[in-house]
Image (tube, helix red, strand yellow):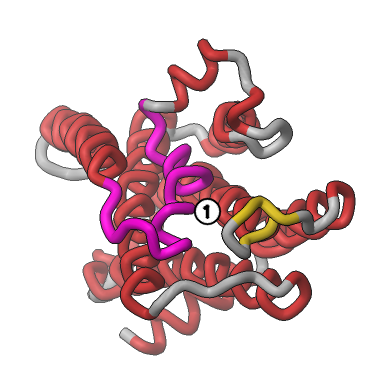
């Protein structure tokens, strides 16, 4: 398993678009926004970086789930590599778990890298251990939903040549809804209303209360994300039944 995981991580590092959008682009946006607007006070001892780092974290997680992960699934389906490996006696379950774990590691790396850079260079305020743990749990639960949506994209689209542009369209569309380019409270009300149904909106905006030790749990996020998980899981089950019990 460990060998498979190391191999999967090496493969991740060989995909420039994955590394750029998950690790480099979030930090770039964080730096540009904080330097451009200035790290001004937003009250109660917090500054602009304490809000925007949540958005930059979302910037890094979305491409992992909607571009890198679906393309990997799509390529595995398209070239029948898993079926061939299974024929030669390779432990497919172990391989798949290692691949999935590599995306979890990449997601965690993106989150922690954002926190590290924001803390070292822009003096990000850190929450208590309990609230930090709650923030990470909420964020990883979000990733469960995002990965399931990415899996649905891969299963229903299949064509890897379409998955990249489709993922990019979804990527920048969601960026628009969650306040990446314009502060969320300045977006038109129809966009804000739609964003209420997007779990990643809560990471980019509402998790601020968790980070500032004001709340341990965001019940609205948990409800919205759970609905998305059920819908995406249902679509995966339907596709599995359609494929006569085989997900791929």
Locate the C terminus and report the quarter of the image it occupies: top left
Q: Residue at x 58, y 77 (%)?
A: 10
- Nearer the observer, 160 or 165: 165
Is residue 27 something that shows in the picture?
yes
The magenta segment is 197-218
Q: Determine which residue is flagged by label 1.
A: 61
Q: Residue at x 31, y 64 (%)?
A: 137
The furthest residue to the front: 44
Q: Position of residue 229 (x, y in %)?
A: 23, 40
Please say whether residue 207 is one of the residues in the magenta stretch.
Answer: yes
Residue 52 versus residue 155 in the image, above or below? below
Q: Residue at x 32, y 66 (%)?
A: 134
Q: Is residue 66 left or right of residue 214?
A: right
Q: Residues within 10 Å of mark 1 (few under 14, many from 20)?
A: many
Is residue 243 something that shows in the picture?
no
Q: How many marks?
A: 1
Residue 160 versus residue 102 in the image, above or below? above
- Nearer the observer, 143 or 64: 143
The furthest residue to the right: 36
Q: Position of residue 180 (x, y in %)?
A: 66, 39
- Nearer the observer, 98 or 219: 219
Secondary structure of the residue carrying numbered label 1: helix
Q: Position of residue 220 (x, y in %)?
A: 27, 38
């Amino acid at each position: 398993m460990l060998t498979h995981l190391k191999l999967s991580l090496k493969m991740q590092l060989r995909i420039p678009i994955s590394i750029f959008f998950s690790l480099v682009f979030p930090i770039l946006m964080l730096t540009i926004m904080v330097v451009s607007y200035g790290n001004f006070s937003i009250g109660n001892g917090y500054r602009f970086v304490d809000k925007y780092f949540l958005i930059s974290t979302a910037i890094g997680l979305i491409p992992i789930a909607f571009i890198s992960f679906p393309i990997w699934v799509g390529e595995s389906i398209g070239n029948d590599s898993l079926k061939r490996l299974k024929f030669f006696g390779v432990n497919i379950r172990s391989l798949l778990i290692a691949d999935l774990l590599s995306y979890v590691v990449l997601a965690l790396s993106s989150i922690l890298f954002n926190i590290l850079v924001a803390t070292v260079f822009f003096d990000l305020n850190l929450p208590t251990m309990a609230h930090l743990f709650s923030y990470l749990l909420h964020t990883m639960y979000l990733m469960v939903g995002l990965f399931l949506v990415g899996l649905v994209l891969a299963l229903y689209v299949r064509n890897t040549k379409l998955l990249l542009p489709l993922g990019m369209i979804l990527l920048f569309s969601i960026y628009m809804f969650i306040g990446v380019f314009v502060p969320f409270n300045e977006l038109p009300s129809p966009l804000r209303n739609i964003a209420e149904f997007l779990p990643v909106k809560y990471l980019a905006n509402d998790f601020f209360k968790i980070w500032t030790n004001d709340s341990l749990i965001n019940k609205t996020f948990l409800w919205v994300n759970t609905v998305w998980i059920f819908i995406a899981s249902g679509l995966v089950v339907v596709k599995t039944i359609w494929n006569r019990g085989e997900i791929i």
